[in-house]
Amino acid sequence: MTQSCPISFKRIDANFVRLIATQVISIALLLLFTQHLLFALILLFDFSIRVLNMKHLSPFAFIAKIIINHFQIKAQLCDEAPKRFALYLGLLIISFVTILYSFQFTLLASVLVVILLICAFLEAAFDYCIGCKVYHLLQILIKKS
């Protein structure tokens, strides 16, 4: 049985999300190995643009759309709200990472990048969204209170 969102009836393509997660992995790995602030800023920009619902300005969304169209990948629809919640969590993490790298707290920033990498890898490889699981857990807790 699949989980569904009690708040939103909007649906998005899970393949689109997974392709974006793959790109997040690529840039996050570059960030982790080089510890260059530029890669954190690229991630911060893309997450921010997508949080603001301006996908047409997101480089990751643009590339994902090209791949989907080129390979004619059939849409696999899923609820948008949990994925959106996960996007907000990703923005929060990359915001902290950017600040931490800016102030030379590279060890703590690297730990957060690894967390982001794990989440993006699980999404890209297995369509398993940690942020979505947190979202559903919060929905259960809210219903109980």
Image (cartoon, grey):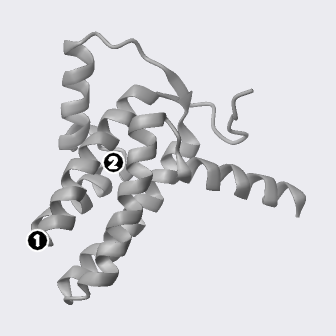
Residue located 49% across and 47% down the image? 84
Residue 77 visible, this angle: yes
- Measuring from the top left, give residue 17's x and y in whole percent: 39, 36
Residue 41 visible, this angle: no
Residue located 30% across and 44% down the image? 54
Q: Nearer the viewer, residue 105 or 17?
A: 105
Is residue 18 left or right of 40 when viewed as pictured? Answer: right
- Measuring from the top left, give residue 112's x and y in whole percent: 37, 71
What residue did someone put label 2 on?
A: 50
How far apart marks 1 and 2 lie (CA) works out to 22 Å
Q: Is the residue 2 above or below the residue 137 in the image? A: above
Q: In which quadrant is the C terminus drawn? A: bottom right
- Measuring from the top left, give residue 55's x and y in whole percent: 29, 40
Q: Dot 2 lies on which element?
A: helix
Q: Nearer the viewer, residue 15 or 59?
A: 15
Q: Residues within 10 Å of mark 2 (few under 14, many from 20)?
A: many
